[in-house]
Amino acid sequence: MVKVNGKELDIAGESISEFLKSTDYDLRVIAVERNEEIVLKSMYDKTILKDEDVVEIVSFVGGG
């Protein structure tokens, strides 16, 4: 199981790109952290999620 934003998901073996395609996240305005390290967008296809990984996905919000 992979923990994504505090929720356990059965997505071990998927790349970050594969997982994100199944979500409503806007890829232009998010950052992904895996095990306390930022994952570069250029590495989403190559980064395979493993059991016990902890992923945090944050969205950038503008304000005024």
Image (spheres, rainbow, N blue to C red):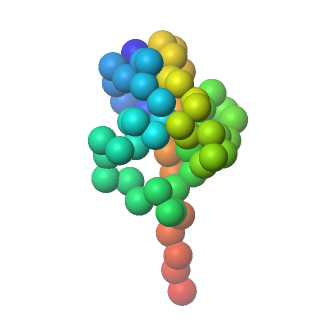
Could you tell me which residue is drawn at 52 percent across and 76 percent down?
A: 62
- For residue 28, say whether it is visible: yes
Residue occupying image coordinates x 35% and y 44%: 21
**Rendered view: 21 above or below 11:** below
**Looking at the image, which residue is at 40% across and 36% down?**
18
- Which residue is the extreme one toward the right? 37
Quadrant that contains the C terminus: bottom right
Q: Quadrant of residue 3?
A: top left
Residue at image position (50%, 23%) is 49
Q: Position of residue 1 (x, y in %)?
A: 40, 15
Could you tell me residue 47's position as x and y percent? 58, 30
Query: In the depicted view, which residue is nearer to us: 56 or 27?
Result: 27
User: Whole-percent x and y of residue 59?
Assistant: 49, 58
Q: How many marks?
A: 0
Q: Position of residue 32 (x, y in %)?
A: 56, 44
Q: Nearer the viewer, residue 46 or 37?
A: 46
Asked if one can make out residue 6 in the rendered structure from this viewpoint, the answer is no
Q: Nearer the viewer, residue 33 or 19?
A: 19
